[in-house]
């Protein structure tokens, strides 16, 4: 029997890979283990991720290592996937999806970005440091920007991002680059049009179409979708909102739902002028 592995975002305290007998390297002396308050959803115990990145908490003075919790959470997801692949052969591990909402939408994006075993990435209401734009932060009127995102939760990402506070227009990338880097693998972006926290409008009208241009150029346009819904932040309709796209990607089930509709808004092509100059294939 063929089972799809359709995995919700899981958090693991990241036991070593049992099936692979991985031995952790000798840990460098950490400057600080994460504390419960700075690392709210990750085990406070030292684990292999901390051996690799020994200062993932708020230790700006050790910026070389402070990779941030979003990547730590993604790493935990990858290790769960390892364990499933090695111990659950009845699960078809070529059909893997990752999702999460809000901060875990950002983490799901990181998980999908860094592991090509993940067939389908489904960030929901992910916002800045996810698929919310650093630029065009005033579009939605929600006021979410690099400044309040990075200052409110500095432990999510590397402190280098904080050096762009008050100059977010100088960040050398924007969120569409992360979306496009997942291509040709599938990506569906869930956003609520009335989300009171994140810049859904910027994600829908700038990030999605700019990434879509890359998917189109690669000949995999149907592999990216924008799943707009009415409603707010992480409401429970996200699942049904993306389900037809999931079934299309994982099972080949046709759907009449259009995953390019950004109603109530329209794309802002002036935000991605380079798409008029895409080289011929
Ligand atoms: C892991 O170690 C156990 C105990 O030494 C051994 O029986 C097993 O074969 C090892 N597994 C792998 C994949 O090497
Ligand atoms: C950013 O700008 C605000 C408002 O002018 C100011 O209070 C803050 O100190 C600035 N932060 C940095 C890191 O420059």
Image: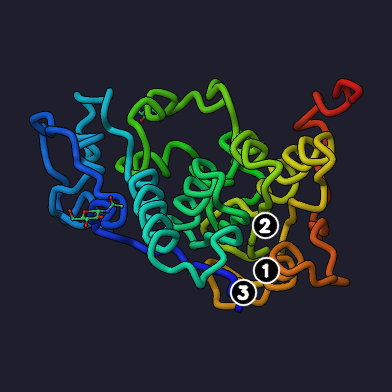
Image coordinates of residue 28 in percent, x first then y, are 12, 29
Which dot, 3 or 2, sits closer to the camera?
3
Q: Is residue 227 above or below residue 39?
A: below
Which of the marked residues, 2 or 1, is nearer the chain's N terminus? 2
Image coordinates of residue 253 in percent, x first then y, are 80, 72
Secondary structure under tag 2 reads: strand
Asked whether the beta carbons under mark 3 and mark 2 sit within 8 Å of each other, the answer is no
Residue at 48% over, 49% down: 111
Image quarter for ligand 1 equals: bottom left
Image coordinates of residue 235 in percent, x first then y, are 55, 74
User: Gap in Å between the C-alphas at discs 3 and 2?
Assistant: 23 Å
Secondary structure under tag 3 reads: loop
Residue 32 visible in the current orientation: yes
The residue at which mark 3 appears reads as 2
Neighbor class of circle 2 (other Cα within 10 Å; few <14, some 14-19, many 20+) is many
Q: Is residue 57 above or below residue 45?
A: above
Which of the marked residues, 3 or 1, is nearer the chain's N terminus? 3
Q: Residue furthest left?
A: 29
Q: Is residue 7 above or below residue 42?
A: below
Residue at 19% over, 24% down: 61
Scheme by which the image is coloured: rainbow
Instruction: Choose between 112 and 195: the one closer to the eye.
Output: 112
The residue at which mark 2 appears reads as 188
Residue at 20% over, 42% down: 23
Secondary structure under tag 1 reads: helix
Residue 143 visible in the current orientation: no
Q: Which mark is residue 49?
A: none
């Amino acid at each position: 029997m063929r089972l799809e592995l359709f995995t919700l975002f899981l958090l693991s305290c990241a036991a070593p890979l049992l099936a692979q007998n991985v031995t952790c390297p000798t840990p460098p002396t950490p400057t600080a283990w994460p504390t419960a308050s700075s690392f709210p959803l990750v085990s406070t115990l030292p684990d292999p991720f901390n051996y690799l990145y020994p200062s993932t908490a708020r230790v700006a003075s050790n910026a070389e290592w402070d990779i941030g919790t979003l990547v730590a959470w993604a790493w935990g997801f990858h290790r769960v996937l390892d364990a499933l692949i090695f111990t659950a052969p009845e699960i078809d591990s070529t059909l893997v999806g990752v999702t999460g909402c809000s901060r875990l939408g950002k983490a799901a994006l990181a998980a999908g970005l860094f592991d090509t075993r993940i067939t389908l990435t489904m960030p929901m209401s992910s916002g800045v440091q996810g698929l919310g734009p650093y630029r065009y932060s005033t579009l939605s009127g929600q006021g979410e920007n690099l400044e309040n995102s990075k200052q409110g939760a500095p432990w999510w990402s590397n402190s280098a991002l904080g050096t762009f506070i008050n100059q977010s227009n100088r960040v050398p990338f924007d969120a569409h680059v992360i979306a496009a880097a997942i291509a040709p693998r599938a990506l569906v972006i869930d956003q609520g049009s009335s989300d009171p926290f994140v810049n859904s409008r910027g994600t829908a009208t700038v990030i999605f179409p700019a990434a879509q241009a890359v998917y189109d150029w690669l000949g995999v346009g149907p592999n990216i979708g924008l799943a707009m819904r009415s409603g707010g932040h992480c409401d429970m309709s996200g699942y049904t909102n993306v389900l037809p796209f999931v079934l299309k990607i994982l099972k080949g089930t046709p759907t009449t739902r259009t995953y390019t509709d950004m109603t109530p808004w329209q794309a802002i092509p002036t935000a991605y002028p380079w798409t008029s100059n895409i080289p011929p294939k």
